[in-house]
Image (spheres, rainbow, N blue to C red):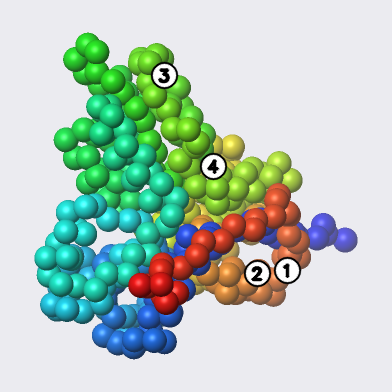
Amino acid sequence: MPAQRQLLIANPRGFCAGVERAIEVVNRLLETRGTPLYVRREIVHNKAVVEDFRARGVVFVEELDQVPDGQVVVFSAHGVSPAVREAAAARGLKVIDATCPLVTKVHHEVVKRAEEGFHLLLIGHAGHDEVLGTMGEAPDRITLITSVEDVAALDFPAGTRLAYATQTTLSVDETTAVVEALRERFPDLLEPSKSDICYATQNRQDAVKDLVRAGIGHLLVVGSQTSSNSRRLCEVAENLGVGASLIDGIDDIDTGIIQPHLVIGLTAGASAPEHLVQEVVDFLHCGGWEPREVVTMAEDVSFSLPSELLGKE
């Protein structure tokens, strides 16, 4: 009798508290204010979430000049620079800020260190919305670091006081390597009082490591190409020698890749809805894969909504 095929499902997976908060912000505004409702950039980096809101009348814009004067505009979970906030105020736009509180923490940290006279080294991915917003807090006193190689190329005048911060959705392992390189070059480097890496990003990466230890031959990650933390989940598995596929849903599953493996894994990025995960589970179960959850830890984090939505204006 052939061995039973297994689908090991990571827990925790999917929505983090910051994503849940941002999505609830848009849902509340649709209920209380209706449309038109404008959102600057993708509210979260997930194709299905954005398409659902678009179908309900939400207008996603790249920049504020696409929003008519006096309208409501939501800032995405990834945060914005002070220049964007000033532009909104100058236009008389009604802003509802859905920035994740953990991203806001990094912004405050950057501002504080810049005011204290430090030059900031921001570890992150060039062009990511979160990075653009964070760098805008101190554009003349911040340098983006994307790799260990970037560290070797840094050149600052003697006596420059340096501090670092990180994008919240990075790979923990990748960030550790860059930080170690920075410490080696700059022994007096000031570090954050607490890691900037989002709790959910780290927890989901740890859960992937547990799936690899459990013997999966391939990992499926539900998430969009625009999602940094989803791509990092693939990298965690690949760095441990296990192939990984980033999928938006069942239409993206390449059965030829997973078919040779008796045990495969499934997880979801922090902006991926659970219903997409369950669709994948049902699809694979019908194909002969027996699903089983692998629990790494329990999460109980939540963030309150912006005061404007709680009657505290």
Give the residue number, with chain letter if any, for mark 3. 183
Give SS at disc 4: helix
Work out whether residue 137 or residue 310 is closer to the camera in this orientation and state it: 310
Give the left or right position of residue 92, taking residue 20 as reference: left
Depth check, mark 3 against mark 4: the one in front is: 3
Q: Amino acid at mark 1?
A: Gly
* Residue at x-position 48% and y-position 33%: 193
In this rendering, the answer to whether 186 lies above or below 72 is: above
The local crowd at label 1, few if under 14, some if 14 to 19, many if 20 or more residues have their Cα within 10 Å, is few
Give the residue number, with chain letter if any, for mark 2. 281
The local crowd at label 3, few if under 14, some if 14 to 19, many if 20 or more residues have their Cα within 10 Å, is some
Kindly give the residue lying farthest to the front in the view shown.
Answer: 312
Work out whether residue 14 or residue 38 is closer to the camera in this orientation and state it: 38
C-alpha span from label 2 to label 1: 11 Å
Callout 2 touching callout 1 (CB < 8 Å)? no
C-alpha span from label 1 to label 3: 50 Å
Image-quadrant location for residue 137:
top left
Work out which quarter of the rendered image holds the N terminus and state it: bottom right
Give the residue number, with chain letter if any, for mark 1. 288
The tag earlier along the polypeptide, 3 or 4, is 3
Give SS at disc 1: loop
Q: Which mark is residue 236?
A: 4
Depth check, mark 2 against mark 1: the one in front is: 2
The tag earlier along the polypeptide, 3 or 2, is 3
